[in-house]
Amino acid sequence: MPAAKIYYDADANVSCIKGKKIVFLGFGNQGAAQAQNIRDSGIPNEDILIANREDAYAEDARQRGFTVTDDFESAAKVADVLFLLIPDQVQPRVFNERFVPTLKEGCTIVVASGYNVFYKLLNIHPTSNVVMVAPRMIGSSVRSLYEKGKGFPCFVSCEQDATGNALEIALAISYAIGATKAGAIESSVREETAMDLFAEQALWPNIIVLFQQAFSVLKDAGCSDEALCYEMWMSKEPAEIFERAAEEGFISQLKHHSTVSQYGQLSGSLRLDGSALRKHFEDILHNQVLNGKFCKEFSKIEEDLEKKGDENPLEQLYKKAEASELGQAEARVRSRLQSSS
Ligand code: NAI
């Protein structure tokens, strides 16, 4: 694999989006941050339109001086650039039903996640550009880092170039939201989706199970719930370790630990045979993520996610996880902490 290109401010020509109508579908985490950054980068307020259903997000956009409409069909007619910044699971329904029929020819569709484009859930017309500008940050950080004059990590890609300058538009957008200041990394919807879903479906589930099993073994050996919760995560030690890993290096952050700890961690990890885990990881990546199996499963339950209580599949999963030994112990510890405060 060749090294990925990294685009900086000097690679962007923001004038290619000046004078264009920029429509944000959604004013939530990413929408609010990116719309404000773009406006502060010199795109006139009258060229920005927030397409939002009537809810608290629409009100927030109005309060911040943006023009807001819930007439998506008319917004589609005027959009030169259309940001899809509503939750991934509702994008196909809203975009396909309410934007596609009236979408302006030559419009550039911007996604902040690869999911719907990689799994081909959006009905993209051949005359549209499709680009990905995907910040690796939550929206509040996209805004606060911009306000501090700093950039943030971001993936950028051109997925369909109908007008011949889709990448130029993607880079102009990356610049205007403040991403090229830190360097926007060339990627693709396949790469972004593979890494994102792999982390969510392989890496973090294993970390959850590691913590649950470690908790259980230490509890059986006589450790208290209180001591375990603090030792394992409530002290924020894992958060600090990852912060140092990001700043100094995944391995070299170990040098902040005691010698006993450094020796234990390095010798222990080098002794472990990761081959079974690797097989399991490969299975998830190829037979669940890349082949679209998870996407199909998720599409089936997507509408149920708006239901309340036990009919909501996510609520059911939360209930199960909270009933685990670790979940129950933590609830007990936290309720005692609250009652003593
Ligand atoms: P969000 O959950 O903050 O979205 C809220 C917005 O969606 C509001 O404007 C709301 O009115 C609208 N909305 C919600 N349900 C709707 C429906 N049924 N019909 C019409 N509008 C509806 O979304 P978020 O988290 O900003 O995600 C947007 C995109 O950005 C997604 O593709 C996500 O993967 C991506 N992304 C999100 C990050 C984050 O910080 N949350 C980080 C990087 C990318």
Image (cartoon, rainbow, N blue to C red):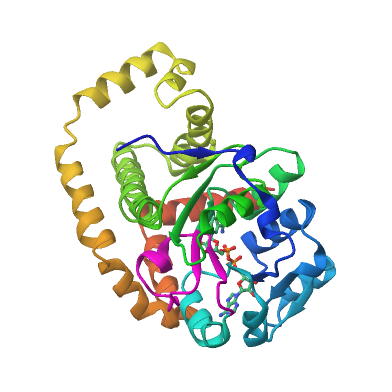
Where residue 115 sits: x, y (%)? 41, 64
Q: Residue at x 57, y 81 (%)?
A: 103
In the picture shown, does residue 279 fall above or below 274?
below
The structure residue drawn at horizontal position 56% and vertical position 67%, both measured from the top left corner, is: 108
Q: Nearer the viewer, residue 153 or 173?
A: 173
In the figure, is residue 178 to the left or right of 258? right
Question: Residue at the front extreme?
Answer: 164
Identify the main secondary structure in magenta: loop
Residue under the point 44% across and 52% down? 329
Relative to the observer, which residue lies in front, 112 or 315?
A: 112
The image quadrant that residue 106 belongs to is bottom right
Q: How many marks?
A: 0
Relative side of 128 to 317, left or right: right
Which image quarter holds the N terminus? top left
Q: What range of the chain is rendered magenta?
A: 104-131
Can you name the residue that lies furthest to the top here?
259
Residue 291: x percent and y percent?
23, 64
The spot of residue 276 in percent (x, y) is 15, 42
User: Would residue 47 appear left or right of 314 to someone viewing this image?
Assistant: right
**Observer-nearest of 233 and 165:** 165
The image shows residue 138, relative to residue 245, as above or below, that is: below
| Side (left or right) of 244 relative to 292 | right
Q: Is residue 181 shown to the viewer in this render?
A: no
In magenta segment, residue 127: yes
